[in-house]
Image (tube, helix red, strand yellow):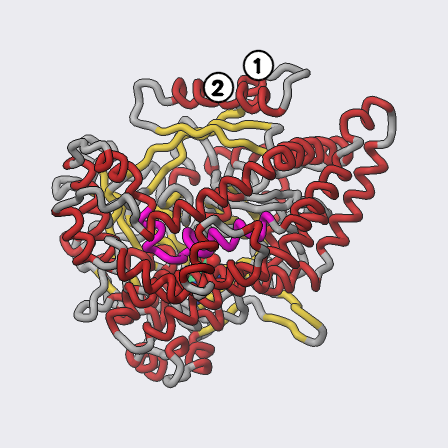
Amino acid sequence: MKRNLLILSLSFLFLFQGNVKADEGMWLPYFLGKKYQEMKALGLSLTQEQLYDINHASLKDAIVMLDGGNCTGEIISSQGLLLTNHHCGYGEIQAHSSVEHDYLTDGFWAYSLGEELVNPGKTASFLVRIEDVTAQVLKEVKATASEQEREQAIQTAIAKLEKDAVKGTHYEAQVANMFEGNEFYLFVYETFRDVRLVGAPPSSIGKFGGDTDNWIWPRHTGDFSMFRVYMGKDGKPADYSPENVPYQPKHYLPVSVKGVKENDFAMIWGYPGSTDRYLSSYGVVQKSDELNPVTVKLREKKMEIMKNYMDQDAKIRIQYAEKYAYLGNFWKKDREESKALRRLKVADQKKALETEFLNWSAQGEDRSAKYGEVISTFEKAYKVKSDSSYSKAWWYIIEASFFQGSEILTFALKHNTLKGMLTAEKDATAVIDELKGEAAHFYKDFNPTIDKEILGAMLQMYHDDLPAELHPEFFKMVEKKFKGNFNAYAEMVFKKSVFANEEKYMNFLSNPKKQLEKEPAMEAIFGLFAKFQELQMAQNELDTELQKAKRLFIDGIRQMNDQRFYYPDANSTMRLTYGTVRGYEPRDAVKYDFITYLEGVIQKEDPTNEEFVVPAKLKELYAAKDFGTYTDNGKVPVCFLTNHDITGGNSGSPVINANGELIGTAFDGNADAMSSDIQFDPKLQRTIVCDIRYVLFVMDKMANAQNLIKELEIRN
Ligand code: ARG
């Protein structure tokens, strides 16, 4: 599951509860000692040191954080070959595609190192070590400190720790907050900046089933792609250079074609982005009933606009493929999340925990003084939020701009510095050169007609759905000058804006006088932004109280259930989750098997539906039973299920058997348990994995990439 970058930065709340089963939990490898015996009991045969060791090579050295946590990858050869999901490489596959070389449709394979494709900006990070720095971070926090003083002391301590940790090295350090400010851990990384595209199947394999099958089992998607990490000749990270050489990993994962059986032990290592397992019952209701309906509605509209043009034009289809897929993924996620939260009565489950907490916190004066107001703070804060619709308004602003909204706005936002320099009549050559680089990238996949429609539609819905006091200032002008017609307003923006298309923009840059002074796209985004900040300020006090309540809530719960070992919410730090291969029963009279086969791909074929086209070559291989050794009783496995606890950011994570061998790459969760970011449901929550035998079958038989097959250590 790919991480939703935005949600992370806006993270509302979080929490976890219920009975911890072997399958629940995104464990820090740091806590391995506490979980190791349980893993052994389930079948693991590696030693603790083989899994995680900061002085010697161990399994953790094969686990890669991609692009700062967007996805996960794993190293599968001694030459830095990396496996991840197709949807994790989708942006790069799309960026290298054109109508002439349509790698989205046809796939791409490099048959030698020289054919691999360079991806500026793409990064691969390896974890060097983890350290518990809670005591150091909290050392200067006085017992009487206000929330603000507390925060300040913490930030000062963190800045120093991060700096000291990497002194004299080329590493990067990050102190991550765990359990909502109760604990802090230091993570040190080595980040490589030359990561090249090696291979991807056609979308008819890598994205087979499209949005219809997305988040759904039974699944038949070959959701994988391959990259290679490069290093400088000195073995250190380097910017792209033809002189760079393939990365020599400390550890790489051997690949097993032995296959999986139900109840086999398996573990997943990776970088889950964000969960809200400690969210209060009030927060659950807000998410399912107030916020998700907004995001679902606005995303649906944007998708409708894009799709209309994508269907008419091959170039636009490629330009907007990644944007559309991104929207589609999170549109469906939020829609299914609301349904699952209600169906599984998650708010009631949270309520039960809150009642228990209330009883616990009422025992003794000290306790009630410290924890007595936690639950009432939750209740009060969400009531204010709901009555004011502040959070809702936020989402209208975000969906209109940052969340794959109108891109002219987000591009315009980058011009504030230039604007200041132009007004002050300063020399802006350096800034302009940088913007030229960004512009080439931006306009390559920008369609003004689509963007104009999105701008008009998003602002219209914002205007019509929310009361005037939640509108940005410039809406009044639109009401007056354009009679409240935001499409007409968007027309004007695109007629006048210097950002409206590449030609206009380049003209502007060639003689950039004071044209940004009354620039309409900038006025729009800064107008939205001003409102955003105003809403944030208005909730500042409330959010500070809420943050404190959350911290105390988790702290209290951990004391209340002191026999239980808790895991912190996902926050893009390395985690492992362990469990077994297994199917499930989604509802009455329905029982899902744990594995799917190529046969199912053929059964789903629908040449009239772009999501279910089956490539001719795949059909030929199927008819000829040309399966190589990648079979299970004569059939080619495609996907299987496990009961692991993963979320967005885990996409591409290795699924590893008891012997430390790779058996698949995790790529999805299931809609039946789409409430999983808030509450783990052991009966329903499953991870959907692309079987490594399907990966090998496609590489070998479809792509004939023998160069890559030879690089792997395949174990029978
Ligand atoms: N659900 C997957 C995830 O969140 C992404 C699948 C991409 N496929 C799609 N049809 N949009 O990681």
Q: Amino acid at mark 2?
A: Thr
Q: Nearer the viewer, residue 322 or 684?
A: 322
Q: Residues within 10 Å of mark 1 (few under 14, many from 20)?
A: some
Q: Which residue is mark 2?
A: 156
What is the residue that sits farthest to the front in this orientation? 480
**Magenta highlight range:** 390-412
From the viewer's perspective, is residue 626 above or below residue 653? Answer: below
Residue name at image x 66 percent, y 68 percent: 585
Residue name at image x 82 percent, y 22 percent: 366
The answer to whether residue 318 is visible is yes
The numbered dot on residue 140 is: 1
Residue name at image x 49 percent, y 25 percent: 131
Q: Main secondary structure of the magenta part?
A: helix
Query: Residue 342's image quarter?
Result: bottom right
Q: Decide: marks 1, 2 in contact (CB < 8 A)? A: yes
Q: Position of residue 631 (x, y in %)?
A: 41, 70
Q: Label 1, label 2: how many angstroms apart (C-alpha)?
A: 9 Å
Ligand 1's image quarter is bottom left
Q: Nearer the viewer, residue 170 or 40?
A: 170
Query: Residue 140's image quarter?
Result: top right
Q: Position of residue 589 (x, y in %)?
A: 70, 76
From the viewer's perspective, is residue 337 above or below residue 230? Answer: below
Q: Secondary structure under badge 1? A: loop
Q: Amino acid at mark 1?
A: Glu
Q: Position of residue 611 (x, y in %)?
A: 40, 75
